[in-house]
């Protein structure tokens, strides 16, 4: 009886691993198609545009964007370590790591709003030219994708 039960558990585990593998392949394929579509649309819009780089962003917006990227990467790194830390330390230490991830996320959102206000005050609007249209369209598309992903993943 033990051998049959163990065999069934191994078979079930292999089935679950195959399902996870298929899901991962579908996700990676979808993300690859999304990336290729964004790059193709960028190339087409860039070639057709006569005034792509006419309005400059300014050094502050570019520096804040790079700093914002570093904040987002730091938040992702801390978030990836939470499960390991939760297993090894106390609940209080784990909550500190979760709090630091939330703080990094709030800093990211605040800087993102500030950068968008700088861009809009410099003339980077969706209706101003194709570069602005692409920038805002990419931002809206990406946030919609992230919202959809987390909505499905949390269910």
Image (cartoon, rainbow, N blue to C red):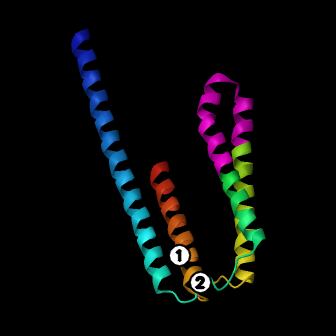
Taking 63 as reference, is 14 left or right? left
Name which residue lies at 52% across and 59% down: 146
Q: Which residue is mark 1?
A: 137
In the image, residue 3 sits, relative to residue 38, either above or below, namely above
Is any part of residue 155 visible from this angle?
no
Kindly state the secondary structure of the residue where label 2 is placed: loop
The location of residue 14, given as percent across then percent down, is 28, 29
Q: Is residue 86 magenta?
A: yes
Q: Is residue 80 magenta?
A: yes
Q: Which mark is residue 129?
A: none
Q: What is the distance, in whole Å, between disc 1 and disc 2 at their CAs? A: 8 Å
Mark 1–mark 2 CB contact (< 8 Å): yes
Q: Which residue is mark 2?
A: 126
The location of residue 132, given as percent across then percent down, is 59, 81
Q: Which residues are magenta?
A: 73-99
* Camera-nearest residue between 83 and 62: 62
* Camera-nearest residue between 112 and 57: 57
């Amino acid at each position: 009886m033990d051998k049959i039960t163990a065999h069934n558990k191994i078979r079930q585990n292999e089935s679950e691993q195959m399902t996870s593998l298929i899901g991962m392949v579908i996700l990676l394929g979808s993300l690859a198609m999304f990336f290729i579509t964004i790059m193709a649309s960028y190339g087409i819009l860039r070639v057709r545009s006569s005034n792509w780089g006419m309005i400059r962003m300014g050094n502050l917006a570019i520096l804040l964007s790079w700093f914002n990227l570093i904040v987002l990467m730091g938040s992702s790194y801390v978030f990836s370590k939470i499960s390991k830390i939760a297993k090894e330390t106390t609940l209080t230490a784990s909550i500190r790591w979760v709090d630091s991830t939330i703080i990094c996320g709030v800093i990211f959102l605040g800087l993102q709003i500030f950068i968008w206000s700088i861009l809009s005050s410099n003339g980077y609007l969706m209706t101003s030219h194709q570069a602005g249209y692409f920038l805002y369209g990419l931002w809206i598309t990406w946030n919609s994708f992230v919202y959809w992903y987390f909505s499905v993943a949390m269910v």
